Amino acid sequence: MVSGGTYGTEQIISGAGYGHGILILLFLPVLWCLPTAFMIGELSSALPCEGGYYAWVRRGLGNFWGFQEAWLSLAASIFDMAIYPTLFVFYLKQMSPWFAVPSHGILAGLFVVVSCAILNLAGIRVVGITSLWLFFCLSAPFAFIVALSPFKAAAIAQAQAAAPVAGTSLGLLGGVLVAMWNYMGWDNASTIAQEVEKPQRTYPRAMIAAVVLVSLTYVLPFVAVYFTGIPASAFAADGSWATIAAVVGGKILGFEWLRFAIVLGGMMSAFGMFNALVMSYSRLPLAMAQDGMLPKFFAKTTKKSDAPWVSIIFLASCWALCLGLGFQRLITLDIMLYGGSLMLEFVTLVVLRIREPHLKREFKVPGGMAGAITLGIFPLALLALAMIESEHESILGMNGLLFGLIIIALGIIGYAATKKFRHRVTMTPMPTEQPATGD
């Protein structure tokens, strides 16, 4: 849910260079990922609820902020989820030009949406096993790049001849934002907590392990390519990893085997990310319907796998409608909306420490109350950078920051519009007992 492998990181190196780019990829896990992972580790061990971060915020801050938390996450998903079928098609048409025709590309994108919806209807175990195998398969080509690069110093001349003259105009700040985008999404795993075995112990361990694993998958391939002498500007073009792989892997019987593997891995990356995030986002309408925040039919689940089939089909249909709109990677807007929801989670961490000090927490953020309060400082500072950068973007003819504020305001309107669904739960106080452990 956080990372689909090394894909999507090219512009960090192209914009910031090897030195700054690798430093960004090394320091962001400490400043951005670990604080988030610690926060999620504590809250998920204390409250392993269906709906995850939405349920935490609703319990700590009330119905209004719980609704806004879910709204911000689902709104951000429109900009995030639209890109994965597009990336799938981008790599697919490198294998078959037939898919370069716009109508054929939309059909391929629709295949991703429908296939992932079907896999999610089968339940989280199927999605989890599929994601695990996809991760190993899409990571294998980069493992070959890391292994072969020390023996490919002679590829320098070829790479310089094929590389663009200069990198992108992204710059250092742009590289930080792209890295933030590649490192965000840790809280998405929390929405399925009630369907995970021993969540109180599983989540903290999984979060810390994933931070290390994701960081390595980003940094090691770039370090390996750096020592070959291939310039940072080689990562400026779309599909740069495929070009680099062709240089590093060479040909076997006239076949660029490593380039083909990278292209195939790119398809698996896009498919796997979409598949896992469908599982995460589909639990939000389910939990909201169970709480009376949305119509009851969103709470319907399949008998065999207990998957929220109405929610899955509804969201998949919404994302399918976006396939032909040609979304670009609106990173700053995506970070802005996601960041708003993330800050609510950090506030909830502190509020629950104050209001429910006796809530059983198998994992706690180190440093007591001071540690909980200061945990969100660096993520907040990084989000402020994204807010500043959004002023330079134009979306639908308006300032990117203004567009984001309009989306946030629509969440307030949505809360008012769903008042009749909330009537039956606002009359009842939220449960204060410790949720089931899932053992």
Image (cartoon, rainbow, N blue to C red):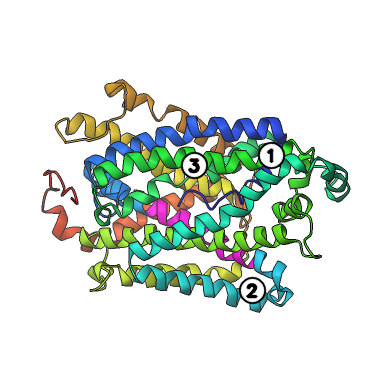
Q: Callout 3, which amino acid?
A: Leu
Left or right, 354 with respect to 233, comes to left
Residue 194: x, y in percent? 24, 54
Q: Classify 10 Å Cα crowding around label 1: few (below 14), some (14-19), many (20 and above).
A: some
Q: Classify 10 Å Cα crowding around label 3: few (below 14), some (14-19), many (20 and above).
A: few
What residue would you read off at disc 2?
A: 105
Label 2 secondary element: helix
Camera-side residue of 200 and 69: 200
Q: Callout 2, which amino acid?
A: Gly
Residue 76: x, y in percent? 47, 53
Magenta residue span: 71-89
Please report whichever mark, 2 or 1, sits nearer to the chain's N-terminal start. Answer: 2
Label 3 secondary element: helix
Residue 426: x, y in percent? 16, 53
The reply to whether the magenta stretch includes residue 82 is: yes
Q: Is residue 68 visible?
A: no
Give me the residue at 33% from left, 66% from top.
Answer: 123
The quadrant in which residue 285 appears is bottom left
Label 3 and label 2: CA atoms lie apart by 33 Å
Q: In the image, which disc is placed on residue 224?
A: 1
Label 3 and label 1: CA atoms lie apart by 17 Å
Q: Callout 1, which amino acid?
A: Ala
